[in-house]
Amino acid sequence: MLVILLLGKHSDAHINPAVPWPMRSQRRYEATYNYRTYSFKVMQCDNTTSERCDTSEKRQANVNLSNPRSPSGIHGELQRDKDMKGRNYRTIKGQAFTRGKYIHGSPPSKISKFMMGDTKGHFEYRFSLVAQSPVQIRHNALEAARVAANKVMFDGLGETGYKIHLKVYPHIVLRENRMIATAGADRLQEGMRRSFGKPSGRAARIKLGQSILDIYVNSNGVDHAKKALRVGSTKLSVACIIAQEKLEVPVAPQAV
């Protein structure tokens, strides 16, 4: 078991800056790493004189590990994960990695179709799901949003009462430096620093104000379109708004 002892001064100065430094409380923290669950557990020790924290003096520490000013001071080590999560790919970083000509073994896109419903029909309204911040969304999240929105529209208007258009394509190839995750591993593999990694998935880069999903309906399907976009937005890791636009329906020429 890996035990890290952390001795840090508690931030009582932020509460009362007038307190002299020798009178401010000092607390000790002990971080224990669990090799089975790949996670840290931080305990707080009330007794600052002993070299090690006794069992009776340990209690769960209220430490914000995402705050670099926390007494632990080991933000990177305390948030080690077994596998790469979806949140690791949200931030747009570096150059786009899209050239399939030079990428061997790139996974295919999970999005089965981009147009659904009556693809050749003309409708009165267009509702768009617009991103409020730049983000990178994986292809499985886009597929989940498409399926959820299409189910709401199909149940409410049938097969030909609407049209859905997914307007982004997952061009970005995601990479991952896989670690040892087998049962009975007696050590923690750290791997190479800043390694390139192997292809593991795809994602689409979304800009601020870009439309992700469009739904075309007539006046009888306005409420269904708004509900479908709200349900679809829950599958995406970005705040979105619903934009409405009135379209001009072309009139068919009459025979003389």
Image (tube, helix red, strand yellow):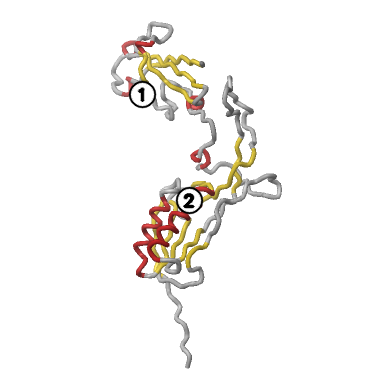
* Of 162 and 75, the residue lying toward us: 162
Q: In the rendering, at what x and y percent does residue 11 appear?
A: 35, 21
Q: Of circles 1 and 2, which is in front?
A: 2
Q: How many marks?
A: 2
The residue that label 1 is drawn on is 62
- Looking at the image, is 69 positioned above or below residue 133? above
- Which label is found at residue 116? none
Cα–Cα span, label 1 and label 2: 36 Å
Say which element carries label 2.
Answer: helix
- Looking at the image, is 159 positioned above or below residue 12? below
Classify mark 1: residues with Cα within 10 Å, few (<14), some (14-19) or many (20+).
Answer: few
Q: In the rendering, at what x and y percent does residue 57 appear?
A: 35, 11
The single residue placed furthest to the bottom in the displayed view is 256
The residue that label 2 is drawn on is 144
- Looking at the image, is 93 positioned above or below residue 170? above
**Amino acid found under the numbered disc labelled 2:** Ala
* Of 20 and 64, the residue lying toward us: 64
**Amino acid found under the numbered disc labelled 1:** Asn
Q: Earlier in the sequence, mark 1 or mark 2?
A: 1
> For the point 53% across and 41% down, which residue is it?
89
* Of 94 and 147, the residue lying toward us: 147
* Of 133 and 39, the residue lying toward us: 39
> For the point 40% across and 18% down, which residue is it?
43
Q: Quadrant of residue 237?
A: top left
Classify mark 2: residues with Cα within 10 Å, few (<14), some (14-19) or many (20+).
Answer: some
> For the point 41% across and 24% down, which residue is it?
70
Say which element carries label 1.
Answer: loop
